[in-house]
Amino acid sequence: DGNSAKNDGGVYAAGSFAAIGGTIGYNTASAEGAGIYLANNGGVQLGSDTGASSSVALCNNTATADGGGAYVAGGYNFIVKQAEINSNSAANGGGIYTVDNSKLNLSGGSISKNTATTSGGGMYLKTGDIHTVYGIAFASNIATNGNGGAIYLEAGSIELSWHTSLRGNKAENGNGGGIYSAGDVKLTGSAAVKANKAKIGAGVYCSGMFTMEGSTAVGGTSEADGNIASENGGGIYI
């Protein structure tokens, strides 16, 4: 904890590694990837399917450029299981930033209270084919001056399912409080998008293909669950 560097104040990985427990926190980077910087093709796992939830914490890391918590480059397969990625900050991708066709596979835990001064408060997915998200709680992430309070998808596709929730995320000076996507978005298996805020598309802003299946909810049965847009598309803007 408390380390600093140009790229990756905490962990710089040029190969595969796993962190099953512990904390990577309070690191700073003058460029990308304050907590973790993944440089070359390989596989990375944070957390585990066994034991207590949120066994790994990636928190309170600050990057001047992109990827406050993690910067995922080089075609990595980035696997997160029951981990907390919380309270990180960057210009883009406060929690996670991906490039070079790197892929995310997230299951369990939380991505919350991360901040991007531009876009992708929770995570910014610049490239990649299919990103999968199962049972993650995205809460109170903020894109201060851009789009995608919780998630910004620039290309490819993302599937959110099995009780994944996006709640209380904000892009009040931009679009897509919960999700901003130029690619394809699929919500299925009880995914919920509630109480997010943006100018346009408070819940979801999608210019690609948007699909909802099963018992997915955008909004809810009470006023407190409603997504709020100051202009158009309180729930979904397509």
Image (cartoon, grey):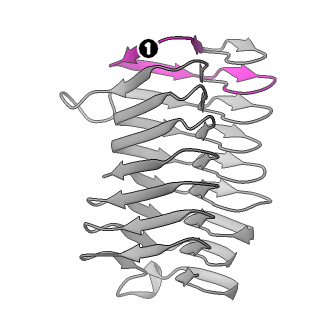
Q: Quadrant of residue 89?
A: top right
Q: Secondary structure at mark 1?
A: loop
Q: Position of residue 164 (x, y in %)?
A: 35, 58
From the viewer's side, name the closer residue of 220 and 8.
8
- What range is drawn magenta here? 11-33
Q: Is residue 37 magenta?
A: no
Q: Is residue 164 left or right of residue 215?
A: right
Q: Quadrant of residue 173?
A: bottom right
- Residue 93 visible in the shown view: yes
Image position of 122 with respect to 30: above or below: below
Which quarter of the figure is the N terminus placed in?
A: top right
Q: Position of residue 99 (x, y in %)?
A: 63, 37
Q: How many marks?
A: 1
Q: Is residue 23 left or right of residue 181?
A: left
From the viewer's side, name the closer residue of 77 and 173.
77
The residue at the point 69 percent across, 65 percent down is 171
- Residue 164 visible in the shown view: no
Q: Is residue 186 left or right of residue 205?
A: left
Q: Is residue 28 magenta?
A: yes
From the viewer's side, name the closer residue of 53 and 105.
105
The residue at the point 67 percent across, 74 percent down is 198
Q: Position of residue 150 (x, y in %)?
A: 56, 57
Image position of 200 with respect to 160: above or below: below
Give the residue number, with chain letter if any, for mark 1.
Answer: 16
Q: Quadrant of residue 211?
A: bottom left
Q: Is residue 1 left or right of residue 118?
A: left
Q: Amino acid at mark 1?
A: Ser
The residue at the point 77 percent across, 43 percent down is 91
The residue at the point 55 percent across, 57 percent down is 140
